[in-house]
Image: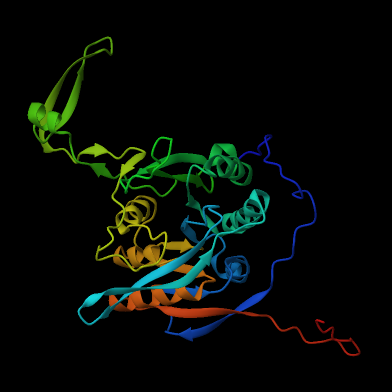
Amino acid sequence: MGKSWSVLLSWPGRTGPEAAVPEVELERVAGDDSAIRIVHGDNEGVLQAMAPELEGKVSLVYLDPPFFTMREFERVTRRKSGTSPPVRILTPAFDDRWCGLESYLSSLRSRLVLLRKLLSPHGSVVVHVDPRTSHYVKVLGDEIFGPDAFASEIVWRYRRWPARTPNFQRVHDVLLRWVADPCAAPRFTQLYEELAPSTLKTWGRGKQKAVFDGTGRRRRSSTEQAPSPGVPLGDVWEISIIAPVGRERTGYPTQKPEGLLERVIGALSEPGDIVLDPYMGSGTTLSVAAKLGRRAVGMDQSHVAVGVTRERLAAAGVQFSEFRAVPVQRQQAPGQLRRHAP
């Protein structure tokens, strides 16, 4: 595992006693032992409940937690009304309001600690945030996984409708990746981008080969007959957001494009691996995992998120099982008085 980190992120109340994780058990709602599982419940309790099954077996954790926007988010659906324009229907989806940054970081930290235990030695965790909190999360992740476990910062750049602001337009998110064990070979499949037009014009589509002299200095380049797979994928990704009328769009707020998850899952896991998403949202991770032949577990406490994911997977013909988290009922000790809330 990673080395300990001497620089720690501190906030008021962090050193106090940690709140106990509510103990839950999973109750099957629908489906059989499918490769894709949906769990309805708070991810902290669900992660603890699933630890005996998943510990050391998860190849990839992708989490897209709330971004500390201090807003409530709604799902938008449209209903046709005769010849009139479609009527927009708003349904509360999730609440991203916090008592303060310290409560946000405490919540995220407790989840990351639980997720670390589930990773296989070759596994990775990818935390998707924005510049509002990415610097805090980077320090927090280094503390939990170890500074030598940090693997990459990926910038997802996209285009969107310009905002009226006396500032540079914000057009990117940040994906921070740590490996479970820096001493183990991580799951990684090299992905490629298309060759630049200038490269194609000069060299064509053949593989380029550097020619060195006796001193080891590069003298020239040549082209081989074998076709080039492209340019190894860098850490700045240009991927469009989902268009308002895009076929992928579910109406769920903060939905991420499948193209983004295809890169993450395709590069950091292999067919048959377990992929876990503790903030499932609209179910993009589960949908892409199913297409790529991965097993996947998604969880969310929002009934709207669970409903959207259920509809999305069913529409794509994906078989899945569904569970819900229920509180563990402990048998009352003889003679013990039951306390009632006032």
Is residue 41 in view? yes
**Residue 98 x, y percent position in the rendering:** 63, 57
In front of the other: 57 or 278: 278
Q: Is residue 180 above or below residue 278?
A: above
Residue 292 position by quadrant:
bottom left
324 sits to left or right of 101: left
- Please provide percent x and percent y for residue 121: 52, 51
Q: Residue furthest right?
A: 335
In this picture, residue 118 sits left or right of residue 320:
right
Q: Is residue 224 left or right of residue 64?
A: left
Residue 199 horizontal/vertical position (percent): 14, 29
Residue 89 in which image quadrant: bottom left
Q: The N terminus is located in which quarter?
A: top right
- Left or right, 1 with reference to 79: right
> Which residue corresponds to the image point at 61% horizontal and 71% vertical from the top-left?
49
How is this picture coloured?
rainbow
In the figure, 49 relative to 175: above or below? below
- Residue 242 percent across, percent down from the top left: 30, 57
Question: Which residue is painted at 11% across and 31% down in the image?
Answer: 224
Which quadrant does the C terminus fall into? bottom right
Q: How many marks?
A: 0
Q: Residue at x 40, y 35 (%)?
A: 168
Quarter of the image where one finds residue 271:
bottom left
Front in this rendered view, residue 124 or 256 = 256
- Visible residue check, residue 272: no
Of all residues shown, which one is farthest toward the top?
A: 215
Closer-to-camera residue (110/70): 70
- Where 109 falls versus 42 (above or below)? above
